[in-house]
């Protein structure tokens, strides 16, 4: 099937703009553009909107009326699922990593506003329990006469990845219209792998000379190489494409995670302040701040050459700035 043949539910304000970062690019010695997917709009925006357009179409085709998913305490994905469920009159259940908070801030506050039901799991047991807990919620829904639809962590599957195949097609049209050449590198924060996989497939189809580099904000490189290559291959297969990836074909930098997923890092916070004070652009401490620190590091060590044209995917996440304010105000 061709990309245009897949059902999607329009949610985002698309296309999102591509913005040149002239001052920051000059400091780094590269041509730097930002794909502003923080402007996708719906439910405060972010990259998960593109995935949700295809996932929601799949859910509705199955008659679902309960959406169940999982994520971190400040999960942008979980917030997007909650917003989409509210828009279409569905119930949403979010299984989140972390303790129940005394005060709901950032994405957790938005989850509550969108009417989501929240379950909190001990961080140390989270990965052992998430599949079991989501299935338990699904079975409870079935017993109640409802039709559940489970969405994986980050919306990371072949269906969700279609959103970022379409994003590359969108960017190609924007670059051609502006007279800009295709980037040498597309760089993104990588939390669960679905956006990365979609970009790999999209670049292979529309920008075949462009390299995609993921900056891990959660797991080690080997984990991402396995997951991303698997999702990318499944996505290419449903599109009828014959190209495939081995794990070693996937470029991931994993030294910018910091302490662990969901915890701000010194380098990430420094990147947030540098970009804010150079370009007036907001990043967040969980995803885009760490990814921008990764961009700085890869330019410094020569992985990204001087003079390269780089497109940074801004995945949104601004609600996560506020719960971590104390890590930034004194920096």
Image (spheres, rainbow, N blue to C red):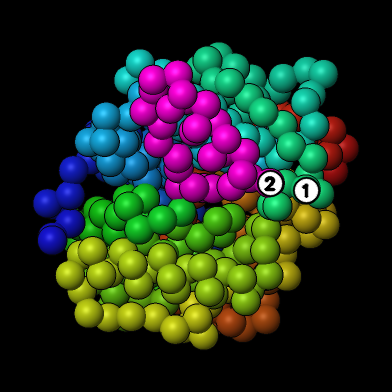
Task: Work out whether 245 lies above or below 80.
Answer: below
Q: Position of residue 12 (x, y in %)?
A: 32, 34
Residue 129: which disc?
2
Which secondary structure, mark 2?
helix
Residue 50: which disc?
none
The reply to whether the magenta stretch includes residue 233 is no
Which secondary structure, mark 1?
loop
51 or 280: nearer the viewer: 51
214 or 182: nearer the viewer: 214
Q: Residues within 10 Å of mark 1 (few under 14, many from 20)?
A: few
Do we see residue 165 in this rendering?
Answer: yes
Residue 125: which disc?
1
Q: Quadrant of residue 48?
A: top left
Residue drawn at x 49%, y 47% is 152
The reply to whether the magenta stretch includes residue 150 is yes
Q: Residues within 10 Å of mark 2 (few under 14, many from 20)?
A: few
How far apart, in angstroms, are the residues tagged by discs 1 and 2? 6 Å
Which segment did they paint magenta?
A: 129-155
Residue drawn at x 72%, y 31% is 120
């Amino acid at each position: 099937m061709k990309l245009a043949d897949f059902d999607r539910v329009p949610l985002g304000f698309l296309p999102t703009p591509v913005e040149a970062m002239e001052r920051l690019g000059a400091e780094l010695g590269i041509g730097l553009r930002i794909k502003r997917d923080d402007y996708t709009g719906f439910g405060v925006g972010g990259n998960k909107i593109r995935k949700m357009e295809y996932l929601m179409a799949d859910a509705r085709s199955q008659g679902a009326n309960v959406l169940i998913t999982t994520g971190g305490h400040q999960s942008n994905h979980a917030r997007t699922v909650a917003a989409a469920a509210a828009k279409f009159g569905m119930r949403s259940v979010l299984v989140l990593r972390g303790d129940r908070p005394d005060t709901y801030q950032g994405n957790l506050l938005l989850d509550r506003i969108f009417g989501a039901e929240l379950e909190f799991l001990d961080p140390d047991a989270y990965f052992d329990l998430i599949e079991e807990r989501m299935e338990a919620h699904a079975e409870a829904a079935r017993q109640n006469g409802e039709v559940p639809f489970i969405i994986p962590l980050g919306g990371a599957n072949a269906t969700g990845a279609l959103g970022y195949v379409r994003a590359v097609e969108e960017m190609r049209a924007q670059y051609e219209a502006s007279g800009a050449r295709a980037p040498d590198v597309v760089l993104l924060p990588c939390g669960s792998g679905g956006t990365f996989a979609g970009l790999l497939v999209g670049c292979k189809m529309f920008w075949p000379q462009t390299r995609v580099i993921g900056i891990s904000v959660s797991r080690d490189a080997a984990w991402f190489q396995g997951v991303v290559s698997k999702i990318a291959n499944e996505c290419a297969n449903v599109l009828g494409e014959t190209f495939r990836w081995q794990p070693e074909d996937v470029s991931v930098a994993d030294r910018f995670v910091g302490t662990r997923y969901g915890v701000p890092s010194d380098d990430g916070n420094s990147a947030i302040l540098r970009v804010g004070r150079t370009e007036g652009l907001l990043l967040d401490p969980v995803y885009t701040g760490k990814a921008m620190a990764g961009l700085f590091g890869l330019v410094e060590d020569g992985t990204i050459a001087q003079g390269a044209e780089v497109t940074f995917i801004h995945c949104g996440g601004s609600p996560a700035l506020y719960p971590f304010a104390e890590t930034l105000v004194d920096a």
